[in-house]
Amino acid sequence: MVSFGIVLFFAVTGLTLNHTEWFANSEKTIRTTGQMPHEWLRAPNNAEPAKLEIVEHLRSVNKLHGAVSDFRVEDNQITVSFKAPGYTADVLIDRDTNRDDIIEVRNGFIAVINDLHKGRDAGKVWSGLIDASAILLTLVSLSGLLLLFFVYKRRTSGLILGAAGVVLCYLVYLRFVP
């Protein structure tokens, strides 16, 4: 029964991934600016900037979320990128003026579930769930095929239909996939 929920999720997101144009207008871009404490950006003796404080400040003050995917320190600026399913935030911090410019992109619910389908920016635990789902669905499919061998009246027709489905998919691939 667990596999029914998994099949429904991957079936719906397979359809939404195949027709992204249906949901193209769900992206929302938010631009904000702010100030960062100078002592976090330019530490004495050319020490590294206070990365943890900078990230936590951005999370608490600007309500940014997701995993930090990039944190680059250059002479005059710092860039920080956050990523999550259906979400990105890019921050540019000027180390001389202490000003931060934030571009946050929220792509909506469909983009979130599409990214979850692909495992994009979802973390290792979600990736493990995808792997477990794939194994579970493989076992369900194989058990259905195995059960077919024990139902004598449906064995031949079931195997013929299964083989026809595989051949049909292969023919569509040969004919229509560039």
Image (cartoon, rainbow, N blue to C red):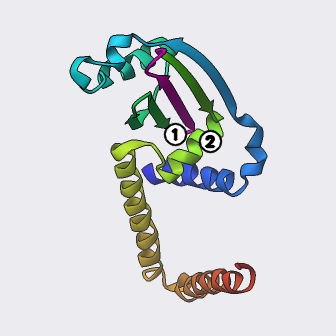
Viewport quadrant of the C terminus: bottom right
Locate residue 13 relative to residue 176 in the image: left or right: left
Q: From which residue to which does the magenta span run?
A: 85-98
Measured from the top left, where is residue 167 in percent x and y? 63, 87
Find residue 87 and report its horizontal and vertical position in percent.
55, 35
Relative to 20, residue 87 above or below:
above
Task: Name the disc covering residue 85, or none.
Answer: 1
Crowd class of label 2 (few under 14; some 14 to 19; many from 20; radius 10 Å): many
Q: Amino acid at mark 2?
A: Ala
- Residue with the mark numbered 2: 111
| Residue 118 within the magenta-colored segment of the rendering | no
The amino acid sitting under disc 1 is Pro
Secondary structure beneath disc 1? loop
At horizontal 53% and vertical 31% (from top left) the residue drawn is 89
Question: Is residue 52 found left or right of 157 in the rendered image?
Answer: left
Picture layout, residue 131 above or below residue 70? below
Viewer-closest of 53 and 161:
53
Q: Residues within 10 Å of mark 1 (few under 14, many from 20)?
A: many
Q: Is residue 166 visible?
A: yes
- Residue 66 appears in which quarter of the rendering? top left
Seen at 48% across and 22% down, the residue is: 94
Residue 106 placement, left or right of 178 = left
Does the rendering let one see residue 1? no
| SS at circle 2 | helix
For image coordinates 39% across by 10% down, the residue present is 37
